[in-house]
Amino acid sequence: GQNIDQPTEMTATEGAIVQINCTYQTSGFNGLFWYQQHAGEAPTFLSYNVLDGLEEKGRFSSFLSRSKGYSYLLLKELQMKDSASYLCAVMDSNYQLIWGAGTKLIIKP
Amino acid sequence: DAGVTQSPTHLIKTRGQQVTLRCSPKSGHDTVSWYQQALGQGPQFIFQYYEEEERQRGNFPDRFSGHQFPNYSSELNVNALLLGDSALYLCASSLERIQREGYEQYFGPGTRLTVT
């Protein structure tokens, strides 16, 4: 079966750095996405990785290791507005998105 | 440039009833995907429409059906509603010709369906 695992909840302090991990087992791989979702709102795109390595975009970076079936999202200089759920999603061999359950990130002052 | 819009925002239905949810894609997009998101869970893929045809389908029963119109807008229909159908229903649009290149899907605000 297809499976995506990420921690249920994480807590971090404003101004700090946090890393959210995602491991996956899917039927094929055509890229991995990270989305941010604030409570009661639609997911918004953060990043896309299809090759191994680190993609940096401002305060957010995403890393992929295809051989390990592993990705992480790194958030730097945390702000209170970063409190949200972070969803990892893998595009499988049918170009269908398989989603994790999301990691709820709580930022404390 | 209008983003993805969905209607209605909220809906309350009774078990056994039928519901129709609507989605208008982002301007210029031709592909619409529907997802069901239960509370505290990630989205679950229901199906995708392109050129007015259902192109892919997730693991959902036939009670879930859809349609895409010539203007690319789409409807999701759910028959014989069950309590377990209560969820946030998300519509996402994209461009078929480049969606395989990592082009992200744009999500609408969702329709919150409550079945009592």
Image: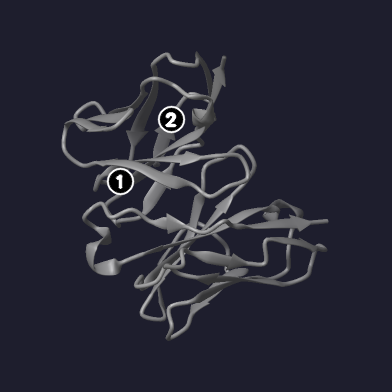
Residue A35 horizontal side relative to residue B21, left or right: left
B85, above or below A29, in the image: below
**Residue B26 in sight from this viewpoint:** yes
- Which quarter shows the C terminus of chain B? bottom right
Crowding at mark 2 (Cα within 10 Å: few <14, some 14-19, many 20+)? some
- Position of A36 with respect to A75 (left or right) is right
Residue B21 x, y percent position in the rendering: 62, 69
Q: Which of marks 1 and 2 is nearer the N terminus?
A: 2
As drawn, B19 above or below B100: below
- Residue A81, placed above or below residue A49: above
The label nearer to you, 1 versus 2, is: 2
Neighbours of disc 1 within 10 Å: few (<14), some (14-19), many (20+): some
Q: Where is residue A58 in the image (x, y as percent from the top left)?
A: 29, 32
Q: Say what amino acid the circle numbered 1 marks.
A: Ser
Q: What residue type is labelled 2?
A: Asp
Q: Residue B113 carries which label?
A: none
Q: Which residue is drawn at 73% across and 72% down?
A: B18
Label 1 belongs to which residue? A27
Give x and y (percent) for residue B32: 43, 68
Residue at image mark 2? A5
Secondary element under disc 2, as helix, strand or loop, is strand
Instruction: Tell me what residue is drawn at x 73 percent, y 64 percent.
Output: B81
Are dots 1 and 2 in contact, CB under 8 Å? no
The residue lying at 51 percent from left, 50 percent from top is: B44
User: Residue drawn 21% across and 33% down?
Assistant: A66
